[in-house]
Image: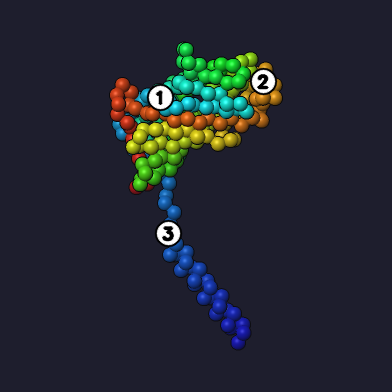
Amino acid sequence: MKKSMRRSALVVCAAASALGLAAAPSMAAPSTVWTVNPSPANFQATNVGNIVLTATIPMTCTVSNAAGSMASAAGNPGDVADITTMNFGASGSPCTSVLGNVTTTSVTPWDVVGVDYTASTGVTKGYVGNVKANVTAGACKFTVTGKASGTYTNSTGILAINSTAGELVVTNPVNCGAIVTTATKPTFKGNYAVKVAGSSVIPTIVGSNP
């Protein structure tokens, strides 16, 4: 009798678990179709506020701009834009650090990659990938490679780059002592206002999974 009751209890628990799983809301599928408007098109991006690359010490740029091309894409992650020009600093407005002025030479193309889209906010989460830049701060020279997480907001056209430690790495440090080493985990943070090249039009990115 006791064994029968135990078996019955197990059956009831299993049934309840199955019902609970069936009633649980399913997770939204990741976007696999990325609709960029206009597409294809060229874009330009200009910093809004300071751009800061930190590799133990902060290196701040008051001027930064980018340009490239964008187009609709399929897949997850989805490559929605290619950055073919990426400038940090300008004549008369160099990037600065406690080691002195900073020169950053970008090795492009970099990729703008979509991973997730929230329709209610019009925000795409993703990252800037294939990042490579040669940095000189005073006598210290090193290369930064990897990716930088970020978001793009359709209503404002702001590409907000907010990388986390470990996404970018340092290679080939020279004359940097213990300040910048291969163990350093750089971060790249800053906002860019994106427009269709030669216009005031803000491009949009919409992700879906039809």
Residue at the disc numbered 3: 25
Measured as percent of width and height from the top left, residue 96 is found at 55, 19
C-alpha span from label 3 to label 1: 41 Å
Question: Residue type at mark 3?
Answer: Pro
Residue at the disc numbered 1: 46
> Cβ–Cβ below 8 Å for labels 3 and 1?
no
Mark toward the start of the polypeptide (3 vs 2): 3
Is residue 2 depicted above or below 49 in this figure? Answer: below
Residue at the disc numbered 2: 176
**Image depth: mark 3 or mark 1 in front:** 1
Q: Nearer the viewer, residue 26 or 180?
A: 180
Label 2: state its secondary structure.
Answer: loop
Question: Residue type at mark 1?
Answer: Thr
Mark toward the start of the polypeptide (2 vs 1): 1
C-alpha span from label 3 to label 2: 53 Å
> Cβ–Cβ below 8 Å for labels 3 and 2?
no
